[in-house]
Image: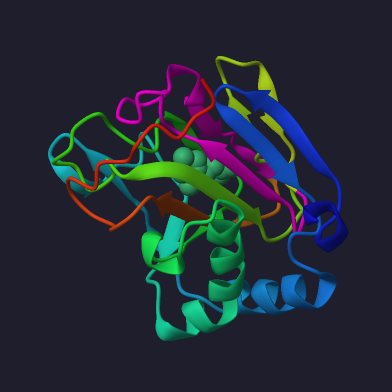
Amino acid sequence: MLSDQYGKIDIHSLNPLILTIDDFCDADEVLKIQNFARAQEFMPSQVSTVEGMKTDRTIRSASGSEPTKETERIIGPARERAADLLNFTINASEPTALLKYEVGEEYKNHFDTTADPESETFGRCFTAVLYINDDFEGGETRFSRLGLDIKPKAGRLALWSNKRPNGTDPHPMSLHAGLPVTAGTKWIATFWIHRGVVGRGAAPAAVSAP
Ligand SMILES: O=C(O)CCC(=O)C(=O)O
Ligand SMILES: [Fe+2]
């Protein structure tokens, strides 16, 4: 049972499904990922826009690191477990996005997917965010239209569905933001979970609760 493997599991919304799982990574794994994250070089993050991927600090001012074999070795097992929760395979997941937010940095309201089958983000049925540390202030993940803030806690996984029940359009209530960090530095790993093959035109079937 999941609750035997992990800590407290909370369901915050059914449609779209939004849940958190505490102690998704145990203390040793959290420490290993923290040490890895702190040692990485970070560059301004890219966001997906109608013109393709670009650096746009008006949407996301956090910075990201290039995923490497080492990222896979250190964070891959958690990504694999997140996909396993949904019975998807690791092949159905994009490379891990490791993000760092310094004071004042944020990720403004956005959807993680689009309704455009040509877009690289079309297949993102689910997003899982692993909170790597919690020695900072601010930085909650806010579902603006649901009045829901998820508090970062080291080792906690937030998992949500991005699609409406038709499986193609972004779920309007999945609009979310990473609020500005007000003290310290926030690190997260984001896993975008696709159903089937990653990439353009990977049509997901209906995956959300009706
Ligand atoms: O920083 C957060 O809490 C949210 C991150 C996010 O929305 C994303 O990586 O797509
Ligand atoms: Fe997001």
Q: Is residue 188 above or below residue 91?
A: above
Among the 4 quarters of the image, the one containing residue 29: bottom right
Residue at point 54%, 67% (across, down): 80
The answer to whether one can see residue 94 in this image is no
Residue 89 is situated, as x and y percent measured from the top left of the image, at: 45, 64
- 11 in relation to 43, above or below: above
Tell me which corner region of the image, top left, top right, bottom left or bottom right, holds residue 110: top left
Relative to residue 210, is residue 46 drawn left or right?
A: left
Which residue occupies the foreground of this view, 145 or 103? 145
Q: Is residue 159 visible?
A: yes
Relative to residue 4, is residue 72 drawn left or right?
left
Q: Quadrant of residue 165?
A: top left
Residue depicted at 76% across the width and 58% down the height: 154
Viewer-proximal residue, 85 or 112?
85
Q: Is residue 108 above or below residue 96?
A: above
- Please provide the residue range marked out in magenta: 153-182
The percent coordinates of residue 63 (x first, y second) are 44, 56
- Judge left or right: residue 98 versus residue 129: left
Which residue is found at the position 28% from the left and 58% from the top? 197
- Give the x, y percent position of residue 38: 61, 73
Please tell me which residue is depicted at 47% across the width and 25% down the height of the picture: 175
Verify whether residue 202 appears in magenta: no
The answer to whether residue 73 is left or right of residue 25 is left
Where is residue 191 drawn, in percent x and y?
Answer: 49, 56
- Is-magenta flag for residue 174? yes
